[in-house]
Image: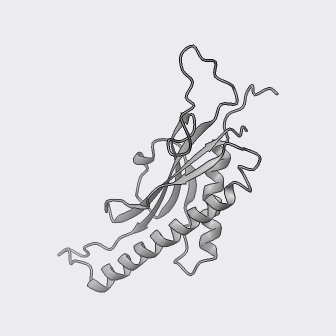
Amino acid sequence: MTTAGQGIAVRSLANSLRDAIEDHWTQSAATPLPERRYVSAGDPGSQAWDCEQLVISLAGVGFGPAQDAAPPATPRAGSPASVMSVRHAVFNIALVRCMPGPTGRSATPPSVAALQAAGDQFMTDAGVLSQSLVRWASRARAGILSGDNMASVQLGVIEPGEISGGFVGLSAAAIITCAALE
């Protein structure tokens, strides 16, 4: 088998994450996802929060299985590394929504009702995002990772982001160990 010109399935995995979140959200009673949804290039921390959006970013690719998955298999000096070595990809998922802020010339604070509604939306988003990732992880082995005996998926904590420029976000991490090539 030749692997020349191939890489681990990072692109396919990122797009499958986005697709799974979109699919789960369409089946939920939650407020729809923002129209802006994409797989992004660059550092997840440098994504602009200037509109509502769902962004899937690559946080890194490492050698060997993810640390919780199995004993490390990182190639060492003097040991040959197989072209089929297992690697892991770390993805960041960010969901950004508008946050009520001061209005008018006198910078009138938002009403308690508006803040409560934003808080309710934030909590609902956290729950639905978490479940969409769990659902994706449970199906990934049978789908995109099928036939990869070393594949595993680890999901991180759903974390709140700082309120910035009238927006607030939730982020999560998904760590996928795989040998699949594309």
Q: Name the residue furthest right.
A: 1
* Up-down relation of residue 5 to residue 55 (above or below): above
Task: Residue 160: name its quadrant.
Answer: bottom left
Number of numbered labels in the structure image = 0
Which percent across, then down, holds residue 129? 52, 67
- What residue is at 64 percent from the left and 52 percent from the top? 15
Residue 11 vs residue 147, the one in the foreground: 147
Query: Quarter holding the N terminus?
Result: top right
* Up-down relation of residue 151 to residue 20 (above or below): above
Which percent across, then down, holds residue 152? 62, 49
Q: Name the residue furthest bottom.
A: 113
Which percent across, then down, holds residue 59? 49, 43
* Up-down relation of residue 22 to residue 147 (above or below): below
Which colour assignment does the render follow? one colour
Task: Residue 71: name its quadrant.
Answer: top right
* Up-down relation of residue 59 to residue 141 (above or below): above
Query: Quarter holding the C terminus?
Result: top right
Q: Name the residue furthest front.
A: 71
- What residue is at 31 percent from the left and 59 percent from the top? 162
Image position of 132 (left or right of 150): left
Q: Name the residue furthest left.
A: 106
Task: Residue 132: name its quadrant.
Answer: bottom right
Residue 155 vs residue 181, the one in the foreground: 155
Image position of 128 (left or right of 49): right
Which percent across, then down, holds residue 39? 58, 51
- What residue is at 52 percent from the left and 77 percent from the top? 31
Residue 145 vs residue 42, the one in the foreground: 145
- What residue is at 74 percent from the left and 55 percent from the top? 143
Image position of 109 (left or right of 85): left
